[in-house]
Every structure is written in C-alpha cells, then in structure tokens.
Image: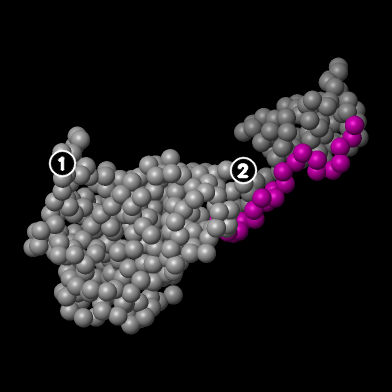
Amino acid sequence: MPPPPASAVTGPSSSVPGAPTHPQAIPWHEARVRAHRAAHPAPPCRTPLRDAIGLTLADDLLALGPQPAFDTAAMDGYAVSGAPPWRIRGTARAGMAWQGILGPGECVRISTGSLLPVGADAVVPLEVATDTDGHVFAAAPPEGRHVRGTGEDAAAGDCLAPAGTRIGPALVGLAAAAGHDWLSVRPRPRVAALVTGDELEHSGVPGPGRVRDALGPLLPSLIAELGGETAALHHVPDRPHGGLARAVHVHGGADVVVVTGSTSVGTTDQLRGLLADAEARMVVDTVACRPGHPMLLAELPAHRWVVGLPGNPYAALVSARTLLGPLLAGLSGRALPRLPRVPVHGKAKVSPGRTRLVPVFWADDGCRIAQGHGAAFLRGAAVADALAAIGPDWEDGGLAPVLLSQE
C-alpha cells in the first residue's frame, strides 16, 4: 500500500519553514499504522540458513518434496503384514532400510523414522507386543496405525511459511528439513542512533545537574529486538549548531536515523527545524499518548527515515515501540502485528483523548500494571513482560491492547 500523501500526514504547522510550534497529535493506534504503511521494503537477498535468524522471508518457503519423503514408522516396534502372530524377518533402523518384501504373517523390528518395508500394513508398538521364539504376538492393529504416510505433512510445492514471516529457530529447522540450504530474505534495516544531551554522563554515578545516559546502552538491543541492525551510535551536543544536522546527514549507509531528545519545541530542540530545512516529508508529528507524545517520524530524500524519540528513557522506549518498531517491520516486509486485547488490572492515570502506555506482567486473570513507569524511570519496563496501551476510558480490569516483544 502506498504511503499517504503528505497533506494527510502532516500537522497544521509542519509545512511552515522552521520548527513548528504546535504540531497536531494523532491517535496512538493510527501512528503505528502510518509508520508501517509509509515504509518501502528493502530488495530481497539470499542468505545461508545459519545467518537467517531474525530476518524476514522475502518469498514463500516451499516444500521441495513431500514431507515425509517416504512412509515411515512413527513408533519403535514391529512393522507387520497381515494377521498375528508375525514371524520376524529382520530389522529396519533409521537410515538403514530392510531390504525385502513382507508377506502376510511377517514382520520386521523397526525404529521410529525408519523406512516402512514394502508390504507392511502398520506398526505395532514395542510396549504392547510380545517377542517369543522369533514370533511377535499382539492384537492386530488397524491398517496404517503408527505410520506417517508419504506427504502426510506437506506435498511437494506446498507453502510451508509465507513471505513476511520473521525467521526463528523453528523456521530454520523447517527449511532444513525441507531440503533448503539458502533462504530469500529481506535484510535487516540499518539504524544509526544519535543520543543528544549536554547533561549526559557515560559512566559511574552522575554529579549534581548531570544525568547518566540510559539510552546509549538501551538502544542497540532494542533495535535488534525490533528487527534492525545498529550501524552507528553517537552522542551529539544539544547546543544550537552543535552538529546534529551534520550527524543526521552523514549516516548515508543507514536506512533509519534515530534521534533521542531534541523532538520538542524548546530552544535546544533542533530536530523539527532541521527536518523542515531538509524538506523532509513528515509522516507522524506528535502522538496523542503518554509518555512520549513529542515523538516523530519523517522521510528524507532517497527513502531514508528519521525517527525522533524523547530524551526521557521510558518515554523513548514507548516511542520506539510506537514508531520505530512498525517502521522496521514495514522495511522488512513484515505485517504490522495485531495486538491481543487482555484484561489489565492495577492503577494508572488516564488522560482525555490520549493513550497511556504502561508496563505489565502476566497474571492468571490477564495482566497487572508494574510500578515505576514515569517518563524518566525504567524500573517497571525492566521487570515487565509487555506494554499495555490503555485508552482514556479504561478502568481497572478493562480490556486493552498489549504490545509483546518484537512488536
């Protein structure tokens, strides 16, 4: 789907040269959709299975042959033909087929995964059979019992996983079992992170008036969780003409530039003015949510993206999950995840017309709000299982969408 026209996605003042003073906040749910729809998926490439984890399928994964490829025993026991008792003719093991044809009243010992001998009707499990003097005694099984038939799981050419699927360990195993050595994938979007703030310290306990940088350590792992690759991480001063414009534009090898801080309209907040000067297309300019409402997403020429996050750590985390996650999903060719709605219990301040993002942990009756979720405080997020997006009408125990990891 093509991105919406600029007139549909900009605030009322974002077309005026210079930094806008009153950008129009859009609903949180709509911000996620706009960020995802605006992205242009990267061209596909091929990668060996060992390097595919975390990438996204660019093409459907097809079965190169039937699965299983032959009739195989689903249990350790005896492959039998006809009615009991059965005379033992030999042994079949995985990778070592028994050579011969079974006639009525005959069987072979067989292990799980072994090729079923010609003439066998079923497999009798070892634990229900009695082996005496070269013969096996058990109740006659139904035809096909404990046998996995050729193509039972998938026929040749079947789609095993659709394009747009994020590749995890199970998919890699599935591809290998189907005979694939390489996969057609979308590469990870490359992200350059710029952390602004003259007050930041990068080690130890900060002194009076100083703040320890939390976003520099946080961002690379968050970017990886959301499906991106950190191409660079730099700290940029707040003061005007302190190098933010140059820092944004020199990262030509990055698909996305993430800027923390500098997204509001204060005297040291340079990002909106910088984007206006660059004639960037504003896709999202402020979101009606708490925390994180001064977030933004803009497109520079040549399909490069700038995501502006607040400087407060928890607000930045919320904003990254709101805009950066959907953008990276779109650049990777993945669908925007549908968010499950579950009961959310606890106390949180709701605001008219705004969504509040709160950290939650799973409970028997849904999920419960974790303490410690001020805009600058990460304690709740650090121990939580997910984020819940509670609306202005939410009450304790009401349903709310939940953002799971990697969404």
Mark 2 touching mark 1, by CB under 8 A?
no
**What whole-number distance in Å separates the C-alpha atoms at marks 2 and 1?**
44 Å
Split into 4 quadrants, where in the image is the C terminus?
A: bottom left
Q: Is residue 318 above or below residue 31?
A: above
Picture coordinates of residue 271, whole percent (x, y): 20, 65
In the figure, residue 292 lies in which quadrant?
bottom left
User: What residue is at 19 percent from the left and 73 percent from the top?
Assistant: 19
User: What residue is at 64 percent from the left and 53 percent from the top?
Assistant: 154
Picture coordinates of residue 40, whole percent (x, y): 36, 69
Residue named by callout 1: 208
Q: Which residues are magenta?
A: 139-162
* Amino acid, disc 2: Asp
First in sequence: mark 2 vs mark 1: 1
137 or 364, which lies in front? Answer: 364
Residue 324 falls left or right of residue 214? right
297 or 265, which lies in front? Answer: 265
Does the image show residue 119? no
Residue named by callout 2: 364
Mark linked to residue 370: none
173 or 166, which lies in front? Answer: 166
Q: Is residue 394 above or below residue 272?
A: above
Residue 87 falls left or right of residue 277? right
Foreground: disc 2 or disc 1: 1
- The extreme left residue here reads 241
Q: Secondary structure at mark 1?
A: loop
User: What residue is at 88 percent from the left and 25 percent from the top?
Assistant: 137
Q: Secondary structure at mark 2?
A: loop
User: What residue is at 55 percent from the left and 58 percent from the top?
Assistant: 395
163 or 255, which lies in front? Answer: 255
Crowding at dot 1, Cα within 10 Å, few <14 / some 14-19 / many 20+, comes out as few
